[in-house]
Amino acid sequence: MQLKTIVGPRAAGTEALEEMVRLLGGGIGVEDTTGRLLLGERCGPARLSIEADGAQVGWVTGPEGAATQAVAEMVRHLAAKECERRALAGEVLHLYREVHLIEQLSEQLAALLDLAAVGRSALEQAHRMIAATSAAILVLDEAGAPLRSIASFGAECWGGVEGFVGAVLERGVGEIVNEVNGDARLTGLGEIQSLMCVPLRAKQRAVGAIVMGHEGVRSAAYSTADLKLLNTIALQTAAAIENSLLCAEMVGAARDREQLEALQKELDTARTIQLSLVPRTFPPFPERTDFEIHAQMTAAKSVGGDFFDFFLLDEDRLGVVIGDVSGKGIPAALYMAVVWSQIKSVALEGMAPEECVTLVNRTLVREKRSSMFATCFYGILNTKSGEFQYCNAGHNPPHLLRAEPAGTSEALAEGGGLPLGLFGGLPYKGSSVWLRPGDSVFLFTDGVPEANNSALEDFTDERLEGLLRRVSHLPCTELVSVVHEEVAAFVDGAPQSDDITVVALRALG
């Protein structure tokens, strides 16, 4: 850094320094390392050194005493701030490049259904961001089956790490080994000195792992930042592998059956896939006492496009998402799987709801292959503060149920934009509301108000709001059950034309 960047005609600190010198009586000057006078005047015996980033960048000259010392301290402060600014700018640029590459990977994986192509694309992007001489993506075709490589580069020496990878998959946590030769779990790795392995997990199930290794000296050792970045790549890769495996299963089934039999079995398979993508274990976080959550999906006879999910972003933030894909049948189920995987992989990055929805919409529009679209509501509850941030992409507004006064139910203010997959380039806006202990948010799809009986009468939003006012005090499990029972009683056996999905979230403080 040169001193003229902070003490010069266009520098922001020059005016303040000149005023400071004037108030101190003048006779003080600032010089660069070549002796060029940048500010003030040469006067006095004192000559105080100015350093930045461990190197000398100039001098402050003037009379002996506090005045010259004060100006020198001011210049040192400005130099330190400039160094901090440059370091931060470099870090931001590095992070921007990482985010750009990850976004490219997300877009590429969303368009791929071939398992080998998914692996090659993921390894290519990982290699661009993380130093490695060898790497592989290893997958589990089924529980208990041996790992097999779907993509790799460098040395083919991964047979000796199967036990190590198996332990990583069992724990569900990535690991770095920067002294491979001293680790008894790793054998037959040749010249590889540093190793990193992260699991590929989808729907709480391990589908494989990404392994990266580096030959050479300790300077090539992996860091926790490398591990975090590889975990981010793994999240997106796992969802793409899961989609590829699911689609491969459906294509294989279609080849082996007669047309009518195949159609019915494919509908059953798609419905099973649809239900398997959403959480089914309740309570999902039994150790948590600061919130409770419960959900239920009743699938229609034909395959629909409802989906929901919830996940911890960190110790204090819980993400919850619900959505509905336009259309019915297998196309809707497949599109739902794509939308769900996109939202989940982006949401786990921890960004604000409106940023997450904007990024997912941009990807869906860019890779659009049909006229389908999806409504979606994504919210993040800060369990410590009670703030609930959300973005609504054309979905039914959830209801806010206040604990005090009892019997209060109101739709959350609209905040967001159009459904996903329709138009790109349109901004999505976020909103927020504060939940006090005991307050709940009730999310649902249009299968609830549009459920109709044999007389073709709808359940309606008004009937739902009245019901919620009466039962707003109930725990989440009972609240969900009562709503489903009331809808079933109203329908009274009439054929169900759409999925019915509800999610109840309560802040406990």
Image (spheres, rainbow, N blue to C red):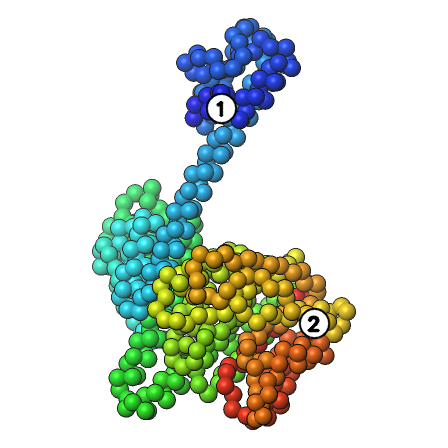
Q: Which residue is mark 2?
A: 409
Please tell me how crowded label 1 is: few (under 14), some (14-19), or many (20+) other residues with Cα within 10 Å.
few
Q: Which residue is mark 1?
A: 10
The answer to whether residue 323 shows anywhere in this view is: yes
Q: Say which quadrant the N terminus sits in.
A: top left
Picture coordinates of residue 48, whole percent (x, y): 52, 14
Of 391 and 33, the residue lying toward us: 391
Residue occupying the point 55% across, 92% down = 494
Residue at figure coordinates x 29%, y 68% from the top left: 115
Helix, strand or loop under label 1: loop
Q: Horizontal and vertical percent for residue 183?
A: 34, 55
Q: Residues within 10 Å of mark 2 (few under 14, many from 20)?
A: many
Type of amino acid under label 1: Arg
Tell me the kind of residue under disc 2: Ser
Q: Is residue 165 shown above or below 40?
A: below
* Residue at x 33%, y 45% (from the top left corner): 220
Question: Which quadrant of the figure contains the C terminus?
Answer: bottom right
- Give the percent coordinates (x, y) of residue 30: 51, 15
Determine the residue positioned at 44% across, 56% down: 425
As drawn, which residue projects farthest toward the right? Answer: 405
